[in-house]
Image: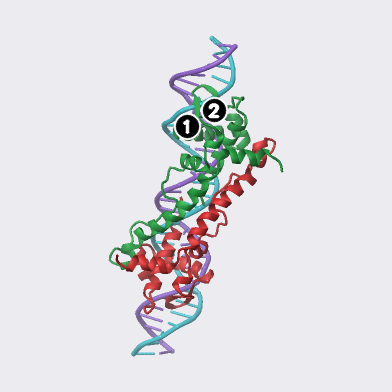
Chain colours: A red, B green, C purple, D cyan
Amino acid sequence: MINTRVAVAIHIMALIASRPNDDLPSDDIAASVNTNPVVIRRMLGMLKRAGLIQTTAGKAGASLTRDPEKISLLDVFHAVEPNENLFAVHDNPNVRCPVGKGIRTVLDEAFGAAQHALENKLSSETLQDILHRLFDDE
Amino acid sequence: MINTRVAVAIHIMALIASRPNDDLPSDDIAASVNTNPVVIRRMLGMLKRAGLIQTTAGKAGASLTRDPEKISLLDVFHAVEPNENLFAVHDNPNVRCPVGKGIRTVLDEAFGAAQHALENKLSSETLQDILHRLFDDE
DNA sequence: ACCACCTGTAACTATTTTAATTACAAGGTT
DNA sequence: AACCTTGTAATTAAAATAGTTACAGGTGGT
């Protein structure tokens, strides 16, 4: 199973987006996510490095660098999931076995295609969509 | 990142499928995957419980229960990845925060859709396709 | 200038997951 | 009976994840 970082990161982004006029300190975000403030600050660091948010050392509050409709879940996913490949492949199959010899290439292709499908879906959903689902009741 | 079980399981299935006339003991499969025989036997157990292969206690050799073109990578994926959800969601967001209150439902939907796209792709690829890629040179 | 509050980050610990290994009961084959 | 096998429990090891403590240094109000 994929770690909770993606989920927490989307939570953080939604919170920031939903309160553009409040300068939320990491403690407040942590209270909403229900975790430790340091965990939040680590994630804010990753989101910042990915260019999704802006923060200032010493000063509470983070802001989005672009509109919520221009931030996809894939952007957030990549920000906090540094691993290029979603599926791990065992790394020393026996090359003297015909299957062992070719399996990594074949798996890379198959897993790559599957991951691409997933990423494609994630890229079609934006932070704005998340906000709508959270706040537009119907 | 997702564990190597899916990769190893596909490796095992491809090996069994490629040598229908040989009764491979778990030691031989382990030599091809390059891991411990017990790891292989555990995976064979999962594949068997999922109805993908047939084995006999005490007797070497496993056989597919149906043709390779009727076994999808999704079948193998589900056999060895018991977790229903690919993405983990943090589990006690603060329900007194509007975002915290609704985030789990929203994330479940978004992640569900992404996972569905991935599974759809995995279901379109069969063990037969893997065998072709491994053995048909062109 | 001071003080209260904040971020960014290192370092450490705890927990969980995954993989590897040892051990062995019990089935199969000759 | 001797030997090889599977199935599985139990243990250990290693790696990934999450939580925590600690603190250097920035920010802004007074």
| Residue holding disc 2 | B62
Q: Residue furthest left?
A: B96
Residue sitting nearer the eye, B120 or B104: B120
Q: Is residue B44 left or right of residue A90?
A: left
Measured from the top left, where is residue A118 in percent x and y? 50, 55
* Quarter residue A20 falls in: bottom left
* Nearest to N terminus: mark 1 or mark 2: 1
In percent of the image, x 55 and y 57: which residue is there?
A: A83
* Quarter residue B18 falls in: top right
| Residue holding disc 1 | B48
Residue sitting nearer the eye, B89 or B117: B117
Q: Specify the amino acid type for callout 1.
A: Lys
Subunit ID for the residue under disc 1: B
Q: Is residue B50 left or right of residue B25?
A: left
Subunit ID for the residue under disc 2: B
Which class describes the residues within 10 Å of circle 1: few (<14), some (14-19), or many (20+)? some
Measured from the top left, where is residue B45 in percent x and y? 47, 32
Vertical placement of B72 versus A34: above or below? Answer: above
On the question of residue A72 being in view, the answer is yes
